[in-house]
């Protein structure tokens, strides 16, 4: 992939746009493209000391978002259709990214 063709947000994994956090050195080849939502909080993201800690804590958002689907589809995932599993995965992904952005915007340490 060309460095000019953003594919996924370097922070949350959503579809990126042509805005990145930039290079950290002359040898850095990754412009760290961001998605639309993350691009609005680029300053907050650049100030993070431990982004992985935020991502770890954001998993709870995925769990919260997916919980109602387990109630709706039943707790035996082996009985789910492929479409239900894909919806489930999408709900988890969305829940994680939304929680991740909430945590970053809040400015609170995730630990
Ligand atoms: Zn993003």
Image (cartoon, helix red, strand yellow):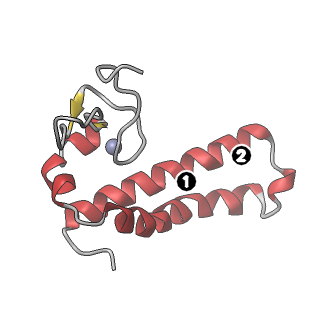
Q: Residue at x 18, y 44 (%)?
A: 24
Assign a secondary structure to mark 1: helix
Question: What x and y, as percent, mark residue 40?
Answer: 18, 43
* 52, above or below 34, in the image: below
Give the answer, above or below, for where 2 lies relative to 59: above
Q: Quadrant of the C terminus?
A: bottom left
Residue drawn where x is 22% and y is 62% of the image:
48
Mark before the other along the chain sequence, 2 or 1: 2
Asked if 1 appears above or below 75 in the picture, the reply is above
Task: Say the numbered circle drawn on residue 85.
Answer: 2
Residue plotted at (59% across, 58% down): 66
Q: Residue furthest right?
A: 79
Residue 47, position as x, y percentages in the image: 16, 59
Q: Looking at this view, is 61 or 109 the one in front?
A: 109
Q: For residue 87, which quarter of the picture?
A: top right
User: How many neighbours does mark 1 have within 10 angstroms: few (below 14), some (14-19), or many (20 or more)?
Assistant: many
- Ligand 1 in which quarter: top left
Badge 2 marks a residue whose secondary structure is helix
Question: Which residue corresponds to mark 1?
Answer: 92
Q: What's the distance in space between the residues labelled 2 and 1, CA to CA?
A: 11 Å
Q: Is residue 52 left or right of residue 66?
A: left
């Amino acid at each position: 992939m060309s460095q000019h063709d953003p594919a996924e947000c370097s922070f949350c994994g959503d579809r990126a746009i042509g805005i990145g956090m930039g290079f950290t050195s002359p040898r850095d080849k990754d412009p760290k493209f961001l998605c639309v939502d993350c691009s609005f909080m680029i300053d907050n993201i650049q100030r993070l000391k431990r982004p992985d800690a935020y991502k770890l804590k954001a998993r709870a958002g995925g769990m919260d978002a997916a919980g109602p689907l387990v109630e709706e589809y039943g707790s035996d995932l082996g009985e789910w259709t492929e479409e239900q599993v894909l919806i489930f995965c999408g709900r988890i992904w969305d829940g994680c990214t939304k929680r991740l952005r909430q945590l970053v915007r809040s400015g609170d340490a995730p630990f």
